[in-house]
Image (cartoon, rainbow, N blue to C red):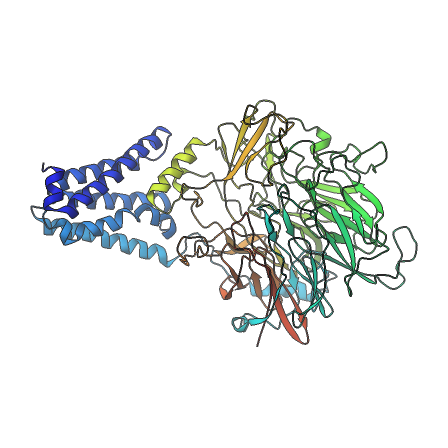
Amino acid sequence: MISIKTLFRETPWLAITIVVLALIALYLLLGGIWLATLGGSAYYVIAGIALLLTCWLLANRSAAALWVYALLLLGTMGWAVWEVGLDFWSLAPRGDILAPLGVWLLLPFVSSRLMPRVRMARAALGFVLIIAIVVLGVSLARDRRAIAGTLPENNTSDAASSASSAPAAGQDWTAYGSTGFGTRYSSLSQITDANVKDLKLAWEFRTGDHKGPDDPDEITNQATPLKVGDLLYTCSQHQIVFALEAATGKLRWKFDPEVKHNKAFQHMTCRGVSYHATKPGAVTAGGGPAPSDCPARIFIPTNDGRMFALDAQSGRPCESFGDHGQIDLKQGSEIQTLGFYEGTSPPVVTDKVLIVGGAVIDNYSDRVPSGVIRGFDIYSGKLIWAFDAGNPDPNEMPSASHHFTAGSPNSWSISAVDENLGLVYVPLGSGSPDIWGGGRSADEERYDSALIALDIGTGKLRWSFQNVHHDLWDMDMPSQPSLVDLRSNGSVTPAIYIPAKTGDIFVLDRRDGHQLVPTPEKPVPQGPAPGDRLSPTQPFSQLSFRPPGMLTDAQMWGSTMFDQLACRIKFKRLRYEGPFTPPSEQGTLVFPGDFGMFEWGGIAVDPKRQIAIANPQSIPFISRLVPRGKDNPAAPNAAHPPGTELGVQPMYGAPYGVDLGIFLSPLGIPCLEPPWGNIAAIDLKTQKIVWQHRIGTIRDEAPLPLPFKLGVPMLGGPIVTAGGVAFITGTMDYYIRAFDIKDGKQLWEDRLPAGGQSTPMTYEVGGKQYVVTVDGGHGSFGTKLGDYVRAYALP
């Protein structure tokens, strides 16, 4: 064997190649042995040995090195296809190091000194590389993770034969989800699948509201604007309200609530405002005549726990509402720490009652404000009723001797309402803290992570449906439900669709909560942390985007084989027994993760065509219980730290804290193979997924702006129009996109100046249809912050 010194002197490129291959071989061999001892794939051990043999043969200038390397590439290819099939993005990291090194070995200044019969060895290695290129080309030609399908053309037959009483947005968009039904549907059809490609920017407005020095990282503008008459109403992250001319985007008025804020806040966001117009002869909830000071009102909740009512035409506070136009939402709670209770989502407006929920700080303590749901007189701001989910008597009103229950399940998201049925549908989270339930009583958790249907006038429970029993995974109900009248054989069933973080979509009769799509209870993993307990079963809807089966180490991913191996080892070291694996000190893989397959954006429903457009995503989390100790005291010993939902959360009052994080590789990318985000369509007549395609590129997250369409996470939901087009903006790359609802084909896109972590909307003014998006970015999501409101229209 020739010495390394001689090799460097005589053939420096060959010597460098040997050193590089040897380092790679040692990494694969040592890492592979670690993975194999954990029960993972033995491939990396074999690959490490083959590379070491290649190095030894190269050092002896033997052409057999190329034969060994060719066999390694061929074996890698076979192993990769066996593990993941012909899926390009799953195959790529398994060969993106070895294949280029194979090309390098063929270069004359590397292999020219090898012997004997080096030409034949080169030909063999070249042939294997050609096979690899063909395999990758075949895998790139078709996305095997997609569902290819077309929605039936006759879906409108039943709908067209019967008039619908369901409200629908048209020229105006009067509520967060287009109407109180939360469908995110518009009957406008000027923009169609044929002409959407011609959309151009019509106007742009800058709010001037930016992140300040006292703001938390979790700062974002998630607003969906409203449009009524000739005005567009929206808000910015500090709950500044803007009224813009719908045709031009020019500012008509703005209102700044001067929100008190600091870094301890867990959120600084606004999802939108609510609108209410006084009807002729209207009376208050108490029976008196409606006041005349604000014939139309805009309601805005704030992150420091207030609610404002503003005159829709002037922006002035309504003097008849509360204390000169505002009420304090912290009233009735014993704990009133600034930032522990935040209004992040628009309230529900009905004829007489304003229904309000709010966000409560997660995983800080069991002594946090109540998440009570309240009904206020929409004119006076007087408290009419309360539903305190953690109280044995949830309708008990606050008094001098009674406060709302600390840590009671809250509703931080958006509710839906059916005023004909007299019901408001409220998605709830879990009691505090989220990841520990050993101290929860049966009363405190009977409505955890549930949808509750409350009487609009009294707040009394009509029915409830629990999405997760004894929730230890932060699987709260995150999305606004969507109400739709299902039509079949001439009959109509009033339904409610409830997207969940688990990926399930629960379909119930909205009159009584009866299941319309079966949701069987199935056994789930057991073995809680000492002092806690678990439900033996959990509900699994038969309409679901939850990935089938359990994750395996073959599904771990990376940009290279190096970080993929690291992810495999990390996966095998965690506790994971499938969905609902309990939190543990070892560290538990939570999949679907806390981030949720569905978030507050919900789904979009076309009630005429009887279809829904959804944007599910797949990001695993890690939940690691941290016992009390020096670095995790049982009580606060300093000021409340900067607000965050990731990292170590103290969970004071529980025997553990929790360390929460996304399951990422050493390079900071998800360890789970893509796609991480999809857009899909559901036929509501069959309750089946008809098509599904990955959405979004890594252009704005990768070190280089590479537009690889992996399918990326998103925050925000879709909208759907009578023109046959769905719009969405929430992806991690900065685009607004339009899709054909028939088959999911992308029809148009435009580049946004910042992250569009919001849900768009559409309206008509002056005979022209506009599509509007709010692009404020998202701090903790990692997208570029901005202050943009942008409107598109046909030329």
Looking at the figure, which quarter contains the C terminus? bottom right
**Where does residue 149 sit, x and y in percent of width and height?**
49, 59
Where residue 750 appears, as percent x and y from the top left, is 51, 66
Q: Position of residue 489 (x, y in %)?
A: 67, 58
Q: Nearer the viewer, residue 706 or 192?
A: 706
> Compared to 436, does 110 lie above or below?
below
Q: Is residue 135 left or right of residue 701?
A: left
State the residue lying farthest toward the left. Answer: 116
Q: Quadrant of residue 159?
A: bottom right
Q: Residue furthest front?
A: 213
Looking at the picture, tell me which residue is in the foreground, 482 or 766: 766
The answer, for residue 60, to whether it is visible in the render is no
Q: Quadrant of the N terminus?
A: top left
In-image side of 446 versus 682 (left or right) = right
> Could you say where residue 280 lies in the image, as x and y percent from the top left?
87, 64
Q: Is residue 465 visible?
A: yes
Residue 709 higher or lower than 790, as above or below: above
The answer to whether residue 521 is left or right of residue 289 is: left
Residue at image point 49% right, 32% down: 577
Image quarter of residue 738: bottom right
All told, the count of numbered labels is: 0
Query: 677 and 159: which one is in front?
Result: 677
